[in-house]
Image: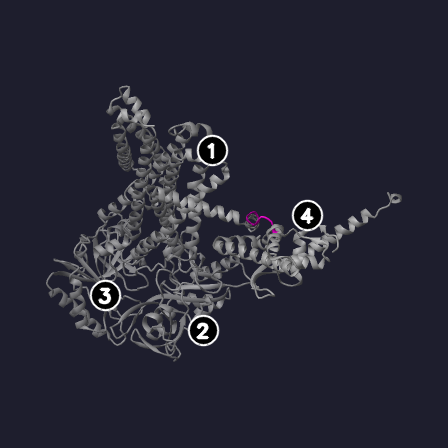
């Protein structure tokens, strides 16, 4: 197992949006999917997942619906709304800009300073 | 933003589902995780423990979820509502008084608003009603929309408008199996429906049928209401026929619901093209020497402004007027004018606009009184609850939350008051609208609780909840915690007290205003009733006869009227009978130009009110002969045409000499009339105005319509003088006429008293409503004053006990309480009378025989309010006087 990293504050919402953008997921599925797409590099504190999901639902970025899980159990599935899709795009773009900027900054060498 | 609001609202209603969903979801999560751990090789028990630990404290997480979902606000709101409801239940008296006060106040406002909506605001359901104008003449307030047909065609061919059409009201006689029915309608030009853009439920409108008859069959368009009433909404009604005024007419269209013609107040159930009217007699189409009640309606051209059109209309009218063969408009009105027609003819709205606005102001004041009442109750309760508030504040409740809580309570009361107010509005609108259904042409006011009235009620309720709740809420939340907790009984501090007093003073001042206006209106009606109008109205029965059926010949009509007179005269209880073209206060206006040889009459006083009567007329209405003679049976066709004039006419044309034997020309008649008598003047047309100059001619010598032969009578009013029960004669009359001729229609059988009352409708209605508001204002003030005095006594029980223990007598205690009340009410009444004096100018136009600053009225209202104040003070004062000092001091 790769060494897992703590996620940055404020990025959880974006990761959830990304996860459910791929396919509708239940809460536990979101957790698994984030692990899977980050090669298990990111570890989400299980407890903070639900408040985040409810917050996103309240903002109308995701929608929830009862459905059946893989093992035929009733589960609440989240999907992205059009507003959520827009938000994900914005956040991804701004994250990429930030990450680039930080990477550039961190790769500076003494000569350039 | 919207998403959050939607989610919040959903939360308010699906609170329980939410809780279920949340725990189900979390359980699923842990079970799934446990399952995965077990599959990974862990012991089931250990897996469960691990899942629980990793998930974290579930209760705390759930709370976090609730907050994330915006539930806290929703929960608090639900708590507030529950708390408010509990408060109301705990003191039901308070809640009931508050809700009823608000309901009556809000209801009265919504009712008057509903009437205003029906009478003033509603536009015709036609295409672009704003572009429609009546082509009138006159200027300023003196605008007339009467015209004649040659003028219609002049406008039609002028090109000033996109389209010009005409309409005139008409009451049709429609045959049915239950006998002839009178149905309101209009005769219109063929392009009427197209010009207006009327919608149809079935069939079509007229297709620019020419106004002159050219051999086509008569057609009619019926209203949705008539379709329902007569045909039960039969979809196959198109092509069916009706017998209208004796002719067969086929139905070609049904207008869509809501369109009732161009005359608000009446419903035009049948519309027929002009050529049908012309079939009967085409002369009116070219008649230029009379103004008749035809209205011309034009639709503005899109490439012309209103001002350009106005100028063109004025120009055309001036040229038309200058042609010698055209009847000159009475007076000096020769300006063409445009009158907006988007709301239909303005007679009703003009007559009732000012009264409605005044009543609206009055109900606004009544509502303000109701609000101060409730606010005061809140304040008083706020004091008794200041301990509770202090406890809550010290336990950490936010002040904002407390304000919100009290506003929730006031909103709850306002919502209940508003809902009940809708009921009040519904009932009062029904009452007001039904009051209009009197007279020959009962006004149909389509007042109902529509969207606008609902919205208005909601807005008013919202304003009330703020008015009522905001001040007390802030007052209470500013409670100083420590002293309030320490005090064994709560003592109102001076600032709050004076606010309560100010509210009561305001209330009394406003009540004074409302009550004095109501008194003035009521006295005006009494004055009008006791006025000597110049005619008597006792024991007179009136009814209208329509013998215009096409199958009747002139000889048959004459025979009918002769035998009707004989039969009625022979009826027991009948002492006299007259036929008259017009009866007093029947709303008819007929001013005809009068020319007197060798006398130059200034243009502005050229016309005279004209009436056509039979000899018994003056006797029945007690109109005394001053000089000469009245009419006799000798004044018939073939003898010298004679006229009787009234004193007003003599006074304005001949001064002090009585013009017996003078010859005059009336209207376009080229044969002179000889004046044979002078009678007293009477207020025939309007009780408020000085009697008009009047000229009477003899029925046997007159043409009732210029196109008809002398002496031929189709429509006439019969006045019967009775010696016994007047109203009971009505059935006798009907049966005699039915017996004489089934083709003659009797309508509007009424006593002269009833007609008099119908003429006073506006004044009576204003008086009745304002008196109701006055009583309401008085009761509210009584409750308000009583409430604050009683509360004051309850709060000061201990003080009073101390004073009495120190030797104050019961009488002194009572008089000090009464003195306080009297002072409060005196200040209120002084301010109130100042308001009443300021409002005098506004109410003056509606008064009759009384000055708006009538000292007697002000004194009477002062007395009434003083008595009210003393009653309000006496009961609590008595309670204070019977306080037992020992018990009062022992308490607490």
In magenta, the rendered stretch is B55-61
Residue drawn at x 48%, y 68% as measured from the top left: B157
Judging by the rendered image, the residue that carries numbered circle 4 is: A9
Percent x, y of residue B500? 38, 33
Q: Residue B292 occupies which quadrant of the picture?
A: bottom left
The C terminus of chain B - image quarter: top left
Gap between marks 1 and 4, in whole Å? 41 Å
Of the two numbered discs 1 and 2 on the same chain, state the one appearing first in sequence.
Answer: 2
Judging by the rendered image, the residue that carries numbered circle 1 is: B478
Judging by the rendered image, the residue that carries numbered circle 3 is: B701
**Element class at badge 2:** loop
Tell if the residue under mark 1 belongs to the same chain as the one under mark 4.
no
Chain identity of mark 2 = B
- Residue in front for this viewpoint, B26 or B783: B26
Gap between marks 2 and 4, in whole Å? 78 Å
Residue drawn at x 39%, y 44% as measured from the top left: B86
- Residue in front for this viewpoint, B823 or A93: A93
Of the two numbered discs 3 and 1 on the same chain, state the one appearing first in sequence.
Answer: 1
């Amino acid at each position: 197992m790769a060494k897992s990293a703590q996620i940055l504050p404020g990025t959880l919402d974006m990761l959830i949006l990304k996860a459910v953008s791929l396919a509708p997921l239940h809460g536990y599925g979101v957790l698994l999917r984030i692990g899977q797409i980050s090669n298990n590099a990111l570890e989400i504190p299980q407890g903070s997942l639900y408040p985040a999901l409810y917050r996103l639902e309240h903002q109308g970025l995701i929608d929830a619906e009862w459905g059946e899980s893989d093992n035929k159990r009733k589960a609440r599935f989240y999907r992205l709304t059009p507003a959520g899709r827009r938000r994900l795009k914005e956040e991804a773009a701004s994250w990429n800009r930030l990450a680039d900027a930080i990477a550039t900054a961190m790769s500076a060498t003494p000569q350039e300073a | 933003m919207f998403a959050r609001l939607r989610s919040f609202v959903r939360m308010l209603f699906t609170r329980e589902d939410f809780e279920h969903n949340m725990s189900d979801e979390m359980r699923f999560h842990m079970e799934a995780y446990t399952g995965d751990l077990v599959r990974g090789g862990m012991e089931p028990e250990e897996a469960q423990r691990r899942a629980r630990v990793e998930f974290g404290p579930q209760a705390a997480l759930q709370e976090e979820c609730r907050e994330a979902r915006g539930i806290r606000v929703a929960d608090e709101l639900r708590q507030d509502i529950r708390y408010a409801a509990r408060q109301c239940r705990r003191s039901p008296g308070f809640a009931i008084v508050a809700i009823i006060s608000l309901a009556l106040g809000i209801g009265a406002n919504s009712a008057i608003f509903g009437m205003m909506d029906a009478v003033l605001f509603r536009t015709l359901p036609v295409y672009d009603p704003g572009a429609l104008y009546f082509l009138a003449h006159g200027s300023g307030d003196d605008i007339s929309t009467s015209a004649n047909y040659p003028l219609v065609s002049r406008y039609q061919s002028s090109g000033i408008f996109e389209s010009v059409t005409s309409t005139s009201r008409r009451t049709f006689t429609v045959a049915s199996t239950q006998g002839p029915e009178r149905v309101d309608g209009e005769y219109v030009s063929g392009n009427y429906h197209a010009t207006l853009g009327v919608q149809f439920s079935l069939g079509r409108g007229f297709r620019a049928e020419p106004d002159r008859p050219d051999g086509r069959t008569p057609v009619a368009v019926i209203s949705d209401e008539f379709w329902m009433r007569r045909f039960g909404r039969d979809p196959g009604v198109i092509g069916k026929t009706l017998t209208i005024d004796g002719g067969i007419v086929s139905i070609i269209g049904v207008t869509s619901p809501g369109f009732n013609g161009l005359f608000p107040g009446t419903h035009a159930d049948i519309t027929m093209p002009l050529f049908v009217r012309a079939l009967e007699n085409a002369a009116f189409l070219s008649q230029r020497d009379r103004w008749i009640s035809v209205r011309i309606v034009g639709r503005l051209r899109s490439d012309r402004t209103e001002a350009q059109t106005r100028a063109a209309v004025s120009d055309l009218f001036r040229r038309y007027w200058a042609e010698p063969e055209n009847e000159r408009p009475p007076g000096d009105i020769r300006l063409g004018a445009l009158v907006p027609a988007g709301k239909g003819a303005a007679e009703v709205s003009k007559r009732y606009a000012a009264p409605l606005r005044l009543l609206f102001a009055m109900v606004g004041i009544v509502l303000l009184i109701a609000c101060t009442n409730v606010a005061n109750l809140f304040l008083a309760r706020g004091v008794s609850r200041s301990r509770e508030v202090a406890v809550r504040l010290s336990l950490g409740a936010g002040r904002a939350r407390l304000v919100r809580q009290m506003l929730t309570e006031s909103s709850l009361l306002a919502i209940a008051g508003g809902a009940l107010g809708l009921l009040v509005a519904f009932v009062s609108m029904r009452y007001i609208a039904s009051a209009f259904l009197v007279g020959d042409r009962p006004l149909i006011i389509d007042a109902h609780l529509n969207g606008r009235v609902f919205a208005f009620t909601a807005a008013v309720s919202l304003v009330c909840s703020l008015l009522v709740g905001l001040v007390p809420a802030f007052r209470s939340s500013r409670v100083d915690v420590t002293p309030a907790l320490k005090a064994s009984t709560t003592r109102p501090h001076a600032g709050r007290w004076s606010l309560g007093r100010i509210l009561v003073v305001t209330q009394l001042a406003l009540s004074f205003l409302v009550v004095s206006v109501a008194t003035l209106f009521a006295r005006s009606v009494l004055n009008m009733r006791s006025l000597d109008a110049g005619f008597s109205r006792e024991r007179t029965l009136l009814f209208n006869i329509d013998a215009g059926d096409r199958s009747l010949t002139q000889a048959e009509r004459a025979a009918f009227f002769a035998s009707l007179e004989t039969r009625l005269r022979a009826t027991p209880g009948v002492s006299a009978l007259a036929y008259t073209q017009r009866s007093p206060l029947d709303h008819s206006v007929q001013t005809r130009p009068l020319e007197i040889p060798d006398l130059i009459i200034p243009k502005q006083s050229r016309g005279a009110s004209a009436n056509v009567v039979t000899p018994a007329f003056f006797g029945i209405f007690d109109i005394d002969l001053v000089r000469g003679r009245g009419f006799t049976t000798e004044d018939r066709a073939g003898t010298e045409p004679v006229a009787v004039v009234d004193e007003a006419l003599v006074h304005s044309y001949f001064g002090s000499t009585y013009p017996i034997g003078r010859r005059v020309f009336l209207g376009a008649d080229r044969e002179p009339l000889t004046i044979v008598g002078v009678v007293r003047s009477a207020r025939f047309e309007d009780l408020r105005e000085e009697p008009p100059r009047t000229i009477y001619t003899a029925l046997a010598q007159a043409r009732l319509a210029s196109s008809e032969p002398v002496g031929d009578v189709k429509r006439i009013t019969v006045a019967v003088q009775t010696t016994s029960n007047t109203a009971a004669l009505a059935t006798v009359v009907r049966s005699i006429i039915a017996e004489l001729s089934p083709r003659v229609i009797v309508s509007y059988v009424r006593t002269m008293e009833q007609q008099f009352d119908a003429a006073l409708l506006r004044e009576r209605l204003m008086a009745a409503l304002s008196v109701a508001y006055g009583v309401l204002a008085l009761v509210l003030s009584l409750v308000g004053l009583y409430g604050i005095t009683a509360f004051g006594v309850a709060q000061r029980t201990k003080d009073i006990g101390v004073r009495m223990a120190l030797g104050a007598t019961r009488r002194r205690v009572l008089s000090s309480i009464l003195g306080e009340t009297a002072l409060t009410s005196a200040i209120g009444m002084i301010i109130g009378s100042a308001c009443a004096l300021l409002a005098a100018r506004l109410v003056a136009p509606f008064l009759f025989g009384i000055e708006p600053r009538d000292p007697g009225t002000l004194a009477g209202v002062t007395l009434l309010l003083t008595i009210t104040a003393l009653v309000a003070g006496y009961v609590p004062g008595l309670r204070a006087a019977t306080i037992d000092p020992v018990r009062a001091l022992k308490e607490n």
